[in-house]
Image (spheres, helix red, strand yellow):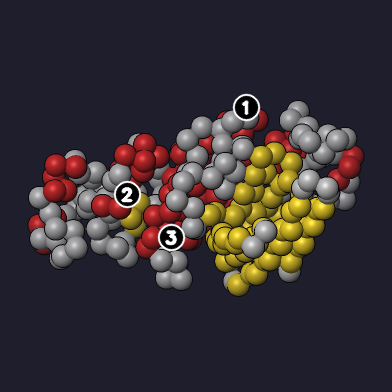
Amino acid sequence: KSLEIIINTENFHVHKRIERSDKSEFRTLKVTQNDQSFEDQYFLHSRSLDRPSDIHHKKREGVDSRNISVAIPLLKEEMDEGILFSYLPVWENTGLPFMVNADFLLTSNREGIHEDYNWNQWLRDEIAETYNLGFVSLLGSDRVSIDQKVNAYRSIPIEANLNFLDPVVESIHEGLSEMKCILSFKINELNTPGKVKSPSPNFLKLLDTSKRLPSSISNNNHPLVLDKLLTPEFRQILK
């Protein structure tokens, strides 16, 4: 699928083309603008939700289920601003460093969400579990490289930029604290946050992490966090 945008005025010219390709749970976007191009790749995770019996809205009469999906960036080397969609973009710079799409009920100008509708609150409260399940699935996939997995940690939100999304951040943190979501020096092993140890930079300097770790460390009941996750940036995210 592709989208082409051409704007020509006397003093301004833009020729932008966006190409999308999907393969299994991966989505690649190639953006070309004025002969310069770049690619973004995302890991997709979707869930089908049954509408709770106490959730109703006149605009969704007869609707018993809805899908919600997240797209976690794999190539970003800095934290993404995040976009929330209701089929089309609604909020940008959400503070959730991933994309989320759900059937939110929008204001008449399509620039906002009716935050007091229980329909929207229900969908909002499902974002965290959808993200957490997708994130752990990504970490466990043998089709995702170690560098892509490390990049994906940048999608863990620290603080939402919208009050309506504050509960999402809190629920993501609470959920991940109980899930096997931390890569250790055993590359193919995931651990819960409480089981791993985060060594100090001085301790890391004593180890040549490109070689096999001593068995006293690699077989420890409290394995070490993967060294690529021990930069100041990732320490801030994971604390």
Q: Identify the residue at image location x=72%, y=58%.
A: 16
Dot 2 crowding, Cα within 10 Å, few <14, some 14–19, many 20+: some
Count of marks, rendered view: 3
- Of 35 and 181, nearer the camera is 35
| Image position of 52 (left or right of 8) | left
Label 1: which residue? Answer: 163
Q: Secondary structure at mark 2?
A: helix
Pointers 1 and 3 in contact (C-beta within 8 Å): no
Measured Cα–Cα span from mark 1 to mark 2:
29 Å
- Of 132 and 40, nearer the camera is 40
Dot 1 crowding, Cα within 10 Å, few <14, some 14–19, many 20+: few
Residue type pointed to by label 2 = Leu
Pointers 1 and 2 in contact (C-beta within 8 Å): no
Label 3: which residue? Answer: 148
Q: Identify the residue at image location x=15%, y=65%.
A: 212
Label 2: which residue? Answer: 229
Whether residue 195 appears in this view of the structure is no
- In the picture shown, does residue 37 fall above or below 59? below
- In the picture shown, does residue 160 fall above or below 29? above
Point out the image quarter for the C terminus: top left
| Image position of 211 (left or right of 160) | left
Pointers 2 and 3 in contact (C-beta within 8 Å): no
Nearer the N terminus, badge 1 or badge 2?
1
Residue type pointed to by label 1 = Asn
Measured Cα–Cα span from mark 1 to mark 3:
30 Å
Residue type pointed to by label 3 = Gln
Dot 3 crowding, Cα within 10 Å, few <14, some 14–19, many 20+: many
From the top left corner, tell me how far across and down residue 109 is, in percent.
86, 35
| Image position of 236 (left or right of 174) | left
